[in-house]
Image (tube, rainbow, N blue to C red):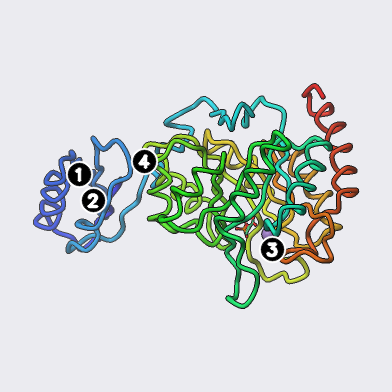
């Protein structure tokens, strides 16, 4: 951290800042300049909270060199992390994975049928929401624990590990009983109590980017989970809000290579919520893989026109089969066998 003093700051103000820094247990090194003095802070091993510094008299600006995320940063952990979900390996160097299934678990027949269809097409994870974060309270809210049971049954029947959303810290226990990968939805990316609770379990977490979150906020959210002791986090880009209304969100694909530079954690892409439109899902799923995503999360429904949520962005079984055929070729093109 570098503290830039105002050109009007005198020695007494500089000394007060030096004392405050030393009071925090760090070393302070004043660097006198021709117009003003800067004070370098040394000895910290991560982000320094500047709360007791920034309002001291004579302080003009505090420049942070360390980021608010350390554990997730590549600087701290240069080697890419591979996260395993029931034997499915996700991360750099592994063939990109496909997680597929309905937006919401709606009933036994729907989820079992979908599980078998996506498995046959080549998906390696089954998705399905039981606790649904809906924009309004008058729409289908999910089958909750009953949905988890149906999802677990479909996972068993198909042999696919399951990924499902958890919305509140109180439900981490019950969701973790059934799920193999616990999803944090975009709306909960900064639900810090939820993130902390997920840090206390060992099961892997799929953390979706908030719809208006910067990359720094996204990584800092992941840091909460790692800081509590759970290193098994997979990031997921799912589109952000912009001025554009022609698509549900704007898929920010540049974060895929950017996150790979900044963090060792795997990054997946959800082209369904990113676009909101069935015809755009396959093109953007393929684009995500070319950009280097470690996997994609796709909504698939046996009868999208009858879906209780997100029908317009859900692929039919036929549409998903076609996408998977293309992904097989793409994997080969990208240097992965099969
Ligand atoms: C979902 O995956 O069903 C979902 C609600 O996604 P998001 O949180 O990205 O909107
Ligand atoms: Mn959905």
What SS does tag 1 mark? strand
The answer to which of marks 1 and 4 sits earlier in the sequence is 1
The answer to which of marks 2 and 3 sits earlier in the sequence is 2
Location of residue 228 by image quarter: top left
CA gap, disc 1 and disc 4: 32 Å
* Label 1 Cα crowd, 10 Å radius (few <14 / some 14-19 / many 20+): some
Measured from the top left, where is residue 282 in percent x and y? 83, 49
CA gap, disc 3 and disc 4: 30 Å
* Label 3 Cα crowd, 10 Å radius (few <14 / some 14-19 / many 20+): many
Horizontal side of residue 98 vs 145, given as left or right: right
Horizontal side of residue 302 vs 40, given as left or right: right
Measured from the top left, where is residue 158 in percent x and y? 73, 37
What SS does tag 4 mark? helix
* Label 2 Cα crowd, 10 Å radius (few <14 / some 14-19 / many 20+): many
Q: Nearer the viewer, residue 269 or 9?
A: 269
CA gap, disc 4 and disc 2: 35 Å
Q: Is mark 2 within 8 Å of ligand 1?
A: no
Query: How many marks can you see?
Result: 4
Which quarter of the rendering shows the N terminus?
top left
Q: Are marks 2 and 1 in contact (CB under 8 Å)?
A: yes
Identity of the residue drawn at 52% across and 33% down = 264
Q: Are marks 2 and 3 in contact (CB under 8 Å)?
A: no
Give the number of the mark in front: 3 or 4: 4
Residue 30: mark in rendering? 1
Identity of the residue drawn at 75% across and 39% down = 289
The residue at which mark 3 appears reads as 249
CA gap, disc 2 and disc 1: 7 Å
The residue at which mark 2 appears reads as 37
The answer to which of marks 1 and 3 sits earlier in the sequence is 1
The residue at which mark 4 appears reads as 227
């Amino acid at each position: 951290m570098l503290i830039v003093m105002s050109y009007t700051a005198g020695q007494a103000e500089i000394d007060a800042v030096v004392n405050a820094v030393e009071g925090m247990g760090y070393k302070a090194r004043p660097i006198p300049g021709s117009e003003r003095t800067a004070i370098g802070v040394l000895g910290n091993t991560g982000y320094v909270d500047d709360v007791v510094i920034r309002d001291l008299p004579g302080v003009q600006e505090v420049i942070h060199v360390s980021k608010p995320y350390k554990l997730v940063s590549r600087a701290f952990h240069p080697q890419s992390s591979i996260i395993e979900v029931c034997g499915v390996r996700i991360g750099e160097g592994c063939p990109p994975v496909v997680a597929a299934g309905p937006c919401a678990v709606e009933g036994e027949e729907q989820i079992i049928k979908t599980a078998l269809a996506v498995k046959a097409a080549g998906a390696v994870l089954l998705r399905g929401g039981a606790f649904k974060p809906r924009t309004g309270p008058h729409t289908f809210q999910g089958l909750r624990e009953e949905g988890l049971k149906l999802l677990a049954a479909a996972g068993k029947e198909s042999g696919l590990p399951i990924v499902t959303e958890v919305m509140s810290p109180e439900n981490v226990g019950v969701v973790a009983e059934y799920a193999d990968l616990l999803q944090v939805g975009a709306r909960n990316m900064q639900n810090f109590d939820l993130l902390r609770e997920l840090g206390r379990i060992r099961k892997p977490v799929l953390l979706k980017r908030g719809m208006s979150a910067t990359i720094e906020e996204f990584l800092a959210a992941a840091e909460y989970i790692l800081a509590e002791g759970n290193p098994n986090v997979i990031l997921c880009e799912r589109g952000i809000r912009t001025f554009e209304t022609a698509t549900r969100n704007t898929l920010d694909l540049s974060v895929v290579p950017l996150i790979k530079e900044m963090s060792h954690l795997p990054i997946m892409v959800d082209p369904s919520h990113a676009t909101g439109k069935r015809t755009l899902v396959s093109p953007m799923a393929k684009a995500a893989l070319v950009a280097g995503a470690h996997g994609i999360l796709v909504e698939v429904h046996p009868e999208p026109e009858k879906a209780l949520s997100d029908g317009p962005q859900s692929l039919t079984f036929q549409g998903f089969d076609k996408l998977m055929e293309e992904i097989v070729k793409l994997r080969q093109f990208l240097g992965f066998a099969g």
